[in-house]
Amino acid sequence: MERRGIPLASFIRPLRENKFQTLGEYPRVCFVPESVGLFRNKTAGETESRPPESFVTFKPFQTARQSFRETFNTSRGLVLALALLTVVAHAAALNGSFKTMDDETSILNNANLRHFSSLGKIFTESFFGGSTYYRPLVTFSFLLEYQAFGLRPFFYYLTNVVLHFSNVLLVFLIFGAVLKKRPLAFAGALLFAVHPVHWEAVANIAGRSILLCALGQFLCVWFYLRHLLEEGRHRHYLLSVAGFVLALLSKEAAVTTPLLLAGVEFWLRRKAPAHRAKFSRREARDRLAPFAVVLAAYFALRASLGISSLALWPSLTYGVFGVLTFLRGVFTDLRIFVLPVDLHFDRATAYFTSFADGRVWATLYAAAVGIWALGHWRARLSRRAKFLMFWVAAGLFPVAQLVPLPAHPGYAAAADHFLYVPLVGLAGLTVLVGSYLFRGAARRKIFSRPAALVLVIGFYAYLTLITVGQDLHAIQELGMFEKSLSANPRNTRVRISYALALAKAGLFREAQTEFRKVLAAEPWDVRARIGLAKSLCDQGKCWEAVQEYESISDAGSMQDLLEQNLKFTYDAVIGQYRGRLALEPGNARLHYSLGIVYARTGRLRDAIQEYRAAARLDPRDRLVLYNLGALWEDQGSPEKAAVCFKKVVAFGRPSRAAGPGRPDELTEFAYRHLAGIYEKKDHPGRAAAYRRQLEKISGRDK
């Protein structure tokens, strides 16, 4: 029996056709039959002049123009050009290494990547631990790479580049359906491919979640469009739902994907006649309903797995300030899109905290002007332009600070990779605006088409060079973090990663300095405290490292790492003491200190041996005798313990700090132990005598 399947060619049919298929071919579900541009069609009586055909006379330009047209008439040639230019822009990222910020947790130290038997854990456990992130497909992709290539970072970066090109291809197809002209689709997809703002997602392995999520979203939108094109072919609809599921299992931001589909229904379909408008709206609801069901099932799954924690603003005022901070970040994003300079890792924006801040009112004024402009031009804007604007808004909605998304205390996350999905809408709008301006300039004969082509090529070359520079910067981990800290010295999250990178490079003293800067700002930061202790240990300051480790009262999810590092540090301290004792075997203090380390690590017999050696060398050392007595008591030798405690009392001297005639605390503790020992040995008389001595020296009357 012949095995039937879904032919891949049907998904990319527009690549083989001379023109992109549009929704205008079907009268019931079609795009609005308006002009392809920024503004709507001309009304009756309006005319549009065209430039003369003999506008270009220079022969080399004519040849270039002909070659350019031939390239644009071949979809496969355009796809090949997109692939080539994407590789040129991001090939430098392939030389990167694993970075300290997320790669150590998600790849290097992730036990779930070692065997395929961990698949169950991958799909039932939180990403990064805790109960906030659920991204099993990201970890699954790392599992496949680990099993195939081990810990060779080249292949992890290669996957990122391949995923990015896959997204570029999908953007090309989506633009082909939305913009309806192949040159415009190519220009928009190329802008998406080489724009420097994508460096953070592509040139860092941690950007895998963004790339996979975007892949699912773009597949969802593309197959939804294909379903509208070919009514009755439900395979495209099912693949659209599958793309939505892929996106949800890659990153939480995918929850806004149904908004994009609603935008397709609202703006990219011809308005139905009045007699069937209600039926048309019902059809749209029916098509969108399964996506709502999938979204509800996704939330239910996370709740059942206990991965559903969601931070909320403590008050409405804080929430308003958070949203205003986001709006301020939007203007920064627009500036970065137009002028991609000052790009740096883990961008953050300081939260607004007061309405007295002038920047709050400046942000509100700029937002009001933007809203007024949209309302003023709304009637002239084409439905495609409105849809692309809506795409930008929907893409930014997950990071709108409706719930707190801090980068570090006092700062809102505003990373460059937040623009990955919204840039599709921005690229489409840029192409529409550029096409509109070009037609206007051509009508007025401001410049020739070859000159415009040179400008466009120069613009894309400029963006590509910046992207290459950013990727080269990204593979230099220390330089990447230093640039980020120069832009925002208070970014403690980046500073911790910078300190870890310094330690990885063997610059332990510099790492110690950076960790102390973090702890000066955030004394509660467990990761910084552990990092500081490790850097001290790497410098040979093991006892200081032990003190830093033991100052951590609650390590939370890092408890295992803390215990592992503390054990390693104690072993290092033991090695140091043994080395010194080999040179100074008669040093009682060294034996005593080594005994303390043995006692703290649970090696009580070794501790007793060292305490006894110290007592032989200095029989009147009360600290040695007290600790030795305490260990004998714990080991079930009360007689030996009593001898040690009696010596502590006999060798006691009044403490100057305590005042004349009062014994020190060691004597009090020794009496307590002696009283307890004799009570257990059923000698109430002796126990009572020691109790009276204890009450006498403690100054308490019973």
Image: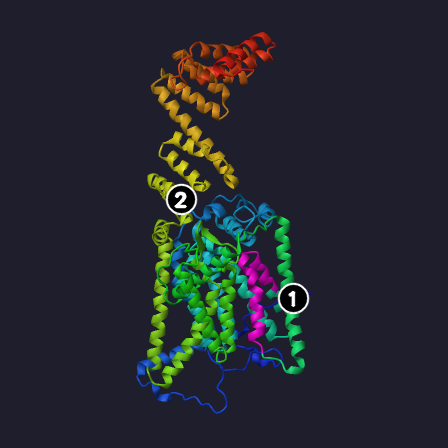
**Is 316 part of what is drawn in magenta?**
no
Is residue 36 placed above or below 351 in the rendered structure?
A: below
Say whether residue 259 is magenta. yes
Chain part drawn in magenta: 241-269
Q: Give amino acid for label 2.
A: Ala
For the point 35% across and 72% down, the residue is 457
Which mark sits nearer the N-terminus, 1 or 2?
A: 1
From the top left corner, tell me how far across and down residue 472 is, in percent.
35, 56
Where is 381 relative to 81, above or below?
below
Q: Quadrant of the C terminus?
A: top right
Q: Residue 31 — which label?
A: none
Q: Is residue 10 visible?
A: no
x and y percentages locating residue 254 in the rendered image: 55, 60
Q: Residue 265 is drawn in which quadrant?
A: bottom right
Give residue 521's mark.
2
Residue at the (46%, 55%) spot, across then down: 207
Tag 2's secondary structure?
Answer: helix
Residue visible at 55% across and 62% down in the picture: 216
Helix, strand or loop at mark 1: helix
- Alpha-carbon neighbours of circle 2 within 10 Å: few (<14), some, or many (≥20)? few
Amino acid under disc 1: Ala
> What separation in Å lies between label 1 and label 2 (alpha carbons)?
49 Å
Q: Position of residue 574 (x, y in %)?
A: 42, 25
